Image (cartoon, rainbow, N blue to C red):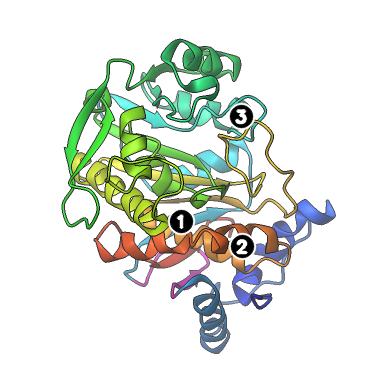
Amino acid sequence: MRKKVVSTLVAAITIMSMFAGCSGRTEEPAENPSGEISSQAEEDTQENIREEAGGSSADISGTENTSGAPAVYMTTDISSQGLIAVYEALQASPEGNIAVKLSTGEPGSNYLRTDLIGDLVQSFEDPTIVECNTAYGGSRSNTAMHYQVAEDHGYTEIADVDIMDEDGSMTLPVTGGTNLEENYVGSHFANYDYYVVLSHFKGHSMAGYGGAIKNISIGIASAEGKSHIHSGGTGGSMWGGDQDAFLESMAEAGKSVVDYLEGNILYINVMNRLSVDCDCDTNPAEPDMHDIGILASYDPVALDQACIDLVYSADDGDALVERIESRNGLHTLEHAEDIGLGSRTYELVNIDG
């Protein structure tokens, strides 16, 4: 049984906003005059979170990154304006053909709605929403059906949509992996110069959780590549194989994508509708915890770790924590850091002031 962590982390980020999903109230938090939590309180907070979430650390800053650790920017404003604000905190300058990678989601799922993401997507010059077909059947397992789902969910109204494995796969080399030597992504992957990875953070029935790392690995993998990752690189069945090999393969596939793009990528996680089930589920469990916020970073490991820490520190996160731990989901982050995909140590920057 995990310990309850009602942490200074939550207070420093805006505790009342984080509980707004439960109470329906909005109140101003008690301010720390320095904009940072005290060193002793921070030490206690970090120790609790490290114990629960597997060794991460998080420095909390009121307005800017000062630690030298990867910055993770956060707002509790889950709105179109909040999404744009957290993106602008990154001070990014995407150029060329810009891909917005998201999950189109199965019908009935908690996929990201266009009223939330539309303004950000349309702020880019000639953006393209990109996805790949699924390997498990469902409504997105072939290209024609998948385009129809994208239209039904409103994505074709805000941007062009490209199912990147419509014409098959291309191969990316995997360096430093223990399971994969190659990663198979949609053949259109190379058509884009910059990737904005927009993920709905939530639970997942196989991976424990889904965030930025899953979106750049399973999400960018072709249907062929998805099977390869799920099998841990063995070419065997997608189902019932070595769980840790699957989790490690996600990290390794994600690293191949990041290596190929050479820095031309950023990541945003939306922490709303925090079901234990993923957007590949047509009938996901109703969330039983409050919405938290929107986070952004140039480091996918830091970003996912920050989201994990916020879930672990929430009073009402037990169901999602159980889902993560029952699938050993933290191992993805452990392996991702080990192979150099990113850092589990980060500085969380609250842009709300």
x then y, percent, for residue 67: 36, 72
Q: Are marks 2 and 1 in contact (CB under 8 Å)?
A: no
Tell me which residue sits at (63%, 76%) in the image. 8
Q: Which residue is mark 2?
A: 321
Quick one: label 2, few (<14), some, or many (20+) residues within 10 Å?
many
Q: Is residue 274 left or right of residue 22?
A: left
Q: Quadrant of residue 318?
A: bottom right
Q: Quadrant of residue 7?
A: bottom right
Q: Is residue 327 left or right of residue 246?
A: right
Lower position in the chain sequence, tag 3 or tag 2 = 3
Which is more toward the observer, 63 or 102? 102
Of the residues shown, which amino acid type is indicated by label 2? Val
Q: Which residue is mark 3?
A: 113
Q: CA distance from mark 1 to mark 3?
A: 21 Å
Q: Quadrant of the C terminus?
A: bottom right
**In the structure shown, which secondary structural element does the residue marked by tag 1 occupy?**
helix
Q: CA distance from mark 3 to mark 2?
A: 25 Å
Of the residues shown, which amino acid type is indicated by label 1? Asp
Does residue 14 sit above or below 134 in this rendering? Answer: below
Q: Is residue 232 left or right of residue 352?
A: left
Does residue 63 sit above or below 246 in this rendering? Answer: below
x then y, percent, for residue 284: 68, 39
**Mark number displayed over residue 304:** 1
> Magenta part mainly helix, strand or loop?
loop
Tell me if I can see residue 343 in this picture: no
Q: Nearer the viewer, mark 3 or mark 2?
A: 2
Per the rendered image, the range of residues in magenta is: 55-67
Tell me which residue sits at (55%, 17%) in the image. 149
Q: CA distance from mark 2 to mark 1?
A: 14 Å
Q: Quadrant of residue 66?
A: bottom left
Quick one: label 3, few (<14), some, or many (20+) residues within 10 Å?
few
